[in-house]
């Protein structure tokens, strides 16, 4: 559900750097290479791996704000250059800190990229000290190169100017904040001036304070893992399986199918009624006598106009029939209709067990694929899945709802019609808004679908979506709930 992660990343505008004379001692270069490898391998490093692309990353003002860009890709090229563009460890250190400073300057505190920058800052500090670069030969080199304006600080808190240092008046609140940070991070090393990205619960709690979210909704109820259930006879019973009779809860089924359809890239042509004038198809109404679109299907479903799943199915098929009637084979819209039809066929079979999406469902249909679980009987299992999913290293773009203004993606809600994120899933779970396990799984699938719909292939957030889909399958498989997810 997130926009491109590069929005506000800390890349450089140009990869060209001046040739340098001399080079680093072999031992120092080896140490720096090790530090860089550790930083690059961290999951939070990918927004900083390349120069910022103002178009791709959706941040047109980046180079108006950042005058001296830098990124890890440029640092690596300078370090690996045979001519030796770094003449000292201090120059390497200065470039990494310039990249982080750019990140914190452009990205407001609390935003995902800012938090990722704080995490990378902590990783870099740790590896720098571990490599022994804070003393010895490297330290002597730094002293020769060091200037007052870019003097390296032992921690990010030391970077505050005297006017930014907390006053005695704020001492108590600062102390309590640190205590909460240590609690949220489970005793892990504290990342000053930010929250560690590997603790999404802490991030969500921090961001929720600005939204006025009730404290009780932030609390997570005790959960029982699959392993604990196996060990404990008292909770070893399998989840209660509740079979529907004749698709008694058919509206929930149709809603899950429609959510999948509306989040498909091929559905963009069919989300709203055709406007013959605006779209330049004056003969449309003469050829298509019974127009239909997915937006109208959504309204009819939400307003309980449909009296059966078959009525819903007929309207979706009418959307596709009209498409093929008006648009000739080989045209773009016709091909989009074929793709959407293929998705509808697969999703309809997945959620109803019907082999033919063009045939009516019998009133007494009770297919094995539709065997579902009342979530009231499996709430602990759902919490286990959600908590682990939130802690996945690639889940950070999906922890909170997308803010089109903050992320610089003003068209997000023009494209994504059913936004979803993990914090919203958590709220719905706390409020017992899910009747069936399939409804819970459908929202997780929706997060992934929204991601793929808005973020082009090979972009960082799209890759995060793929990783989240794999993680969800792995977590849902033990409960046999992955049957409602899109296949890998």
Image (spheres, helix red, strand yellow):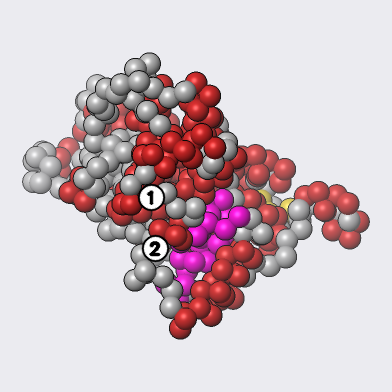
Position of the C terminus, as image quadrant, is top right
Total number of numbered labels?
2
Q: Which residue is mark 1?
A: 151
Q: Position of residue 17 (x, y in %)?
A: 26, 27
Q: Position of residue 255 (x, y in %)?
A: 47, 53
Q: Residue at x 49, y 31 (%)?
A: 32
Dot 2: element: loop
Residue 58, visible in the rendered structure: yes
Vertical comparison of 171 with 281: above or below? below
In the image, the segment drawn in magenta is 189-212
Residue nearest the viewer, comparing 443 with 61? 61
Question: Callout 1: 10 Å neighbours few (<14), some, many (20+)?
Answer: some
Mark 2 vs mark 1, foreground winner is: 1
Vertical comparison of 289 with 176: above or below? above
Q: Residue at x 23, y 40 (%)?
A: 55
Q: Quadrant of residue 242?
A: bottom right
Residue 331 magenta-drawn? no
Residue 199 magenta-drawn? yes
Q: Which mark is residue 160?
A: 2
Q: Residue at x 72, y 43 (%)?
A: 478
Vertical comparison of 187 with 274: above or below? below
Dot 1: element: loop
Distance, label 2 to label 1, CA atoms, is 12 Å
- Which comes sooner in the sequence, label 2 or label 1? 1
Question: Callout 2: 10 Å neighbours few (<14), some, many (20+)?
Answer: few
């Amino acid at each position: 559900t997130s926009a491109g992660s590069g929005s506000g990343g800390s890349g450089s505008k140009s990869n060209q750097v001046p040739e340098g004379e001399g080079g680093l001692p072999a031992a120092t270069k080896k140490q720096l290479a090790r530090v860089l490898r550790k930083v690059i391998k961290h999951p939070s490093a990918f927004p900083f791996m390349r120069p910022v692309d103002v178009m791709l990353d959706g941040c047109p003002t980046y180079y108006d704000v950042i005058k001296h860009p830098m990124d890890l890709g440029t640092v690596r090229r300078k370090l690996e250059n045979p001519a030796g563009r770094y003449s000292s460890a201090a120059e390497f250190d200065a470039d990494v800190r310039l990249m982080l400073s750019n990140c914190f300057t452009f990205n407001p505190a609390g935003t995902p990229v800012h938090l990722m920058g704080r995490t990378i800052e902590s990783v870099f500090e740790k590896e720098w000290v571990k490599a022994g670069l804070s003393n010895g030969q490297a330290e002597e080199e730094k002293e020769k190169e060091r200037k007052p304006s870019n003097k390296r600080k032992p921690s990010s808190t030391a970077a505050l100017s005297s006017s930014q240092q907390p006053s005695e008046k704020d001492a108590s609140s600062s102390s309590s904040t640190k205590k909460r940070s240590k609690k949220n991070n489970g005793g892990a090393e504290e990342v000053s001036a930010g929250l560690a990205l590997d603790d999404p619960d802490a991030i969500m709690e921090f961001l929720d304070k600005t939204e006025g979210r009730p404290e009780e909704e932030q609390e997570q109820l005790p959960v029982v893992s699959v392993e604990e259930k196996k060990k404990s006879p008292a909770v070893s019973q399998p989840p209660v399986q509740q079979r529907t009779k004749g698709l008694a809860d058919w509206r929930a089924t149709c809603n899950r199918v429609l959510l999948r359809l509306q989040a498909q890239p091929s559905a963009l042509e069919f989300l709203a009624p055709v406007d013959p004038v605006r779209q330049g198809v004056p003969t449309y109404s003469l050829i298509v006598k019974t127009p239909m679109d997915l937006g109208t299907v959504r309204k009819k479903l939400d307003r309980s106009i449909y009296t059966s799943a078959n009525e819903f199915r007929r309207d979706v098929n009418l959307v596709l029939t009209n498409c093929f009637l008006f648009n000739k084979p080989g045209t773009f819209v016709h091909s989009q209709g074929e793709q959407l039809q293929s998705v509808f066929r697969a999703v309809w079979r997945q959620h109803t067990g019907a082999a033919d999406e063009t045939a009516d469902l019998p009133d007494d249909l009770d297919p094995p694929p539709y065997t579902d679980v009342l979530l009231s009987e499996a709430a602990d299992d759902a919490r286990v899945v959600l908590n682990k999913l939130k802690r996945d290293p690639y889940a950070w773009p999906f922890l909170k709802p997308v803010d089109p203004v903050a992320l610089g993606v003003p068209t997000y809600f023009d494209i994504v019609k059913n936004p979803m994120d993990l914090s919203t899933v958590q709220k719905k779970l706390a409020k017992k808004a899910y009747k069936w396990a399939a409804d819970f799984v459908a929202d997780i699938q929706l997060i992934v679908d929204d991601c793929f719909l808005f973020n082009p292939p090979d972009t960082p957030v799209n890759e995060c979506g793929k990783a989240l889909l794999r993680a969800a399958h792995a977590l849902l498989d033990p409960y046999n709930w992955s049957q409602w997810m899109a296949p890998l």
